[in-house]
Amino acid sequence: MSPTQWDLPVELCCRPMAFVTLTGLDVVYNAVHRAVWDAFCANRRADRVPISFKVLPGDHEYPKCRPKRTSYEWYIPKGILKTGWMNKHLNLVPALVVVFYELDWDEPQWKEKQSECATRVEIVRQSLQGRNTKVAVVLIQKKTPLPPGEDVIASERAAALCNACELSGKSLFVLPHTDHLVGYIIRLENAFYEHAQTYYYTEIRRVKSHKEFLNKTTHQLLFVRHQFKIAFFSELKQDTQNALKNYRTAYNLVHELRAHETNILEIKTMAGFINYKICRLCFQHNTPLDAIAQFRKHIDLCKKKIGSAELSFEHAAWMSKQFQAFGDLFDEAIKLGLTAIQTQNPGFYYQQAAYYAQERKQLAKSVCNHEASIMYPNPDPLETQTGVLDFYGQRSWRQGILSFDLSDPEKEKVGVLAIQLKERNVAHSEIIITLLSNAVAQFKKYKCPRMKSHLMVQMGEEYYYAKDYTKALKLLDYVMCDYRSEGWWTLLTSILTTALKCSYLMAQLKDYITYSLELLGRASTLKDDQKSRIEKNLINVLMNESPDPEPDCDIFAVKTAQKLWADRISLAGSNIFTIGVQDFVPFVQCKAKFHAPSFHVDVPVEFDIYLKADCPHPIRFSKLCVSFNNQEYNQFCVIEEASKANEVLENPTQGKMCLVPGKTRKLLFKFVAKTEDVGKKIEITSVDLALGNETGRCVVLNWQGGGGDAASSQEALQAARSFKRRPKLPDNEVHWDSIIIQASTMIISRVPNISVHLRHEPPALTNEMYCLVVTVQSHEKTQIRDVKLTAGLKPGQDANLTQKTHVTLHGTELCDESYPALLTDIPVGDLHPGEQLEKMLYVRCGTVGSRMFLVYVSYLINITAEEKEIVCKCHKDETVTIETVFPFDVAVKFVSTKFEHLERVYADIPFLLMTDLLSASPWALTVVSSELQLAPSMTTVDQLESQVDNVVLQTGESASECFCLRCPSLGNVEGGVATGHYIISWKRTSAMENIPVIRTVITLPHVIVENIPLHVNADLPSFGRVRESLPVKYHLQNKTDFVQDVEISVEPSDAFMFSGLKQIRLRILPGTEQEMLYNFYPLMAGYQQLPFLNINLLRFPNFTNQLLRRFIPTSIFVKPQGRLMDDTSIAAA
């Protein structure tokens, strides 16, 4: 039996479509016919009817139709389903034969053409030999036909043609060969589809009619056969619901058949076919749960129907194919839009198929273990006359024999032997690998990493059994990473053992060494005797000798491997193998630890390398090298012990490089850092540990960084979480888990031995030259040289502060915008031990707020470290935060000549500008002078002289000035009139003489100026006396360009009598002045209200007396009357 016996037939797996044959088309030599055929078969989209077309000659011989049986009384069926039946109805027996004939309605030789067409139809009918196949005629015409009923000749000739061909009118079609050919073809297809539907419906009726002749005793197989045929015809008819229903019935009938060793294969084969059809239709109907339920039922019913023990591998093969077929169906449904989930996807079915394929392999190995002397039977019992079986699932040497008793046991025995010998030649591993590969692809798609890894291991093992060691190693290597990272040590050990065998059989030196190193380590769960064997083999390889074969390897493969190893030894090549350990777990662990996170440049850098071996026996290494990011340090960190190759396992307690299993070895290294590395990080980039020597083979274990391998991070995490108490160790030993890798350290500058002091008087005042005295004193034992000072605003602060802060060494001149915020590398000179120097810095801060200032002193000094003289650059910095405040607050106000507050001033009328300078400094301030710079729109009434020259203000004290000003008439000015600037020149009282004076400019506020029509002012003494005359003169000035009519009246007062005009009306010309003279006579002493002058301007009714009160006095102080002294009084005194 062929290896492909278990593959499902193509005709079972394809989608059944109605079979229609086309005759009368010459698709090779006739272009019109070719175009018609292309329109039928090209670009068949999903929306076109499901028909399978085939072009055949008109006299094609179709399969003969057997004579119809009238009775089944004595009929004994020989099997369930013939192997050719499905193919016959899919590809050989058409539902419809279409005869194409070129004939137009106006054909001159109509009669002859009609007769020829009828003859062709008759030939087709004869070739069908009594089948129910429909026949149709299509007339290929050159002209487009007229609408039905309009062409009388066409109607008549169509009827005549139908009579001649014995066709109904529905079986005659016209196909005009025009531009719309495809459209006509699609309409033809739909008509053909209806004819095919009718044919398959008739076939279903015909099969159903046989049921009444059957009985349950002898015709059980026919019940299954007929039910399957009905379902298959329903599928051809595209009635999938009825097809599914009939397949389910057929499935149940199969399992009602009495099973025996002789027919068990046929029952399982048919059950598998019908199950496939049911599952396919369930997926097609978008009911995947029904498909899964059916498949599970199918497996439960069939998994115990094993059959003959001698052919048990056949059952495993059949089970494998069932799972594979269902996986294919499931995957196909997903591609068509079905959604699968992580726990229910095709991968599980492919995995199970692979499991049964592996079981098949094991069973075949145990059952088919015949000796080599046994020959394949001749003649071949598996061959048939036709080359194929008559019925699905039967044995070729007893086809059609349904008896449970074997008529020829010897023939049976020979047939079984032939099957077993054939099975021996099956490439089981290839089948298993293909199935596992499908499963892996599915689990990868549905993100099931552990399932994927598990199956990849199985694939690797199958490749190993198939002797494809390269692919086996590739897969196993890929999976090892996952198992290492998750800590599956038992699984990893098993995989490593297989990988070691592969590398041995291929004589892959580097891989063999790598897997040996890991199998000797802590991740390996091998016993000590196995580890000892591997360790011995590893040493043999390092001594340039062949290792012993790995156990359980194929004998022939071992012989081949030994030849390869012999070639490896004889070939001269690179004998040094560098193996990076970050991706695996070797038998040696390494940790590097600097003694401190940073070292001063004048102190030697010290670090330890910790080594620990996990192999069964002590082992000697030949060399240890530590590499740094600065390679100049590498030369200081090398340990090398010369030893012969055969001394690797000898003298286990001698030398630094000998490691005892379970004991931690600590190696100390030290070196002096270079001065140019100050401020830089020194990192251990790698640690190399060499095993063996260059005369044999040498393996260099390379740890990246400060050590650690693939399992280190997980072990460190477990150690951190563990509450287990560690046992006490001797003083010179440490717990391995307690060692924390520290692979980098920082080189920092030497500790400076100088003092830096800052002296100043905070806070700083805005814009002043603030003095900061820096005192540097050396406490070094030797002279320091190249002392440099960097001072100023500390970098990294707000950019606005940088722009408004300026530093200089010269305090005699004011800083401007060109001065920097930070002075760098100011040379100071050399300093002897104990010597000190002072530097004065002057800082000008243009804005208030906090500022951080930096003073950084650097110098060079010669020192000796580890008997080596080096030049160290030391530095010390001090920072100070200085607050900047305003030195004083300036208040400005406008008042009238009566010292009343003014919201606005009046044109050409004097007013007073008062300034108030309040000291906000905690230190005494000296106001050197002040100056008032008036705007062009202002004029002064008096001389502008400073009234606060050289005034010293303590904290909280104030100094005031008063200036009398006048504003000429300017018309209406938006936003008021500029007054000018008030400039104050000042300095700290404590500042030195040469410190420049600071000029602070205060911009005076704008003032609103109004014009008034009439200005009144009064001339009167500063005080009056009771009963003495008090002359008062009023001046009235017309400020307009008009003649003013003025009404004046005087309101009397109880405190005064007066003489003068009490009420008068007068006229004042533009720009002129009128005087009014009154004599007031005080009657009472004290602060008295003067008689009030009421003025009414007829032209300006808005001019009120309230406004007048701002210009003329309303009260005066009156002194009491003095007494005359007589002589008596004087004498008495």
Image: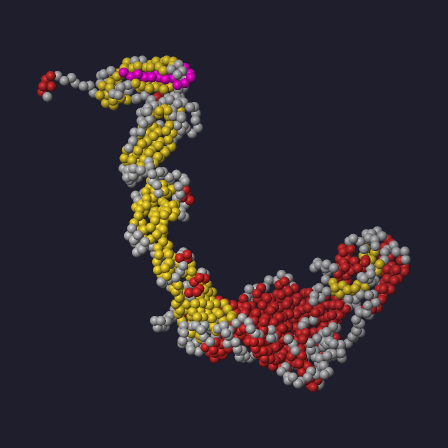
Q: Is residue 1069 visible?
A: yes
Q: Residue at x 30, y 48 (%)?
A: 837
Q: Please identify the quarter of the rendering in which residue 202 is found.
A: bottom right
Where, quadrant-wise, is the N terminus in this rendering? Answer: bottom right
Q: How is the image coloured?
A: secondary structure
Q: Main secondary structure of the magenta part?
A: strand
Q: Is residue 1024 left or right of residue 348?
A: left
Where are the magenta residues, as a range? 1031-1051
Taking 1065 as reference, is 823 above or below it?
below
Looking at the picture, how far across and down is residue 581, in whole percent? Answer: 48, 68
Q: Please identify the quarter of the rendering in which residue 431 is found.
A: bottom right
Q: Is residue 108 left or right of residue 338?
A: right
Q: Residue at x 10, y 21 (%)?
A: 1133
Looking at the picture, how far across and down is residue 367, in whole percent? Answer: 62, 82
Q: Is residue 106 left or right of residue 320?
A: right
Q: Is residue 580 left or right of residue 844?
A: right
Please tell me how many numbered marks the rendered image carries: 0
Q: Is residue 1053 magenta?
A: no
Looking at the picture, how far across and down is residue 959, in whole percent? Answer: 29, 33
Q: Residue at x 42, y 16 (%)?
A: 1042
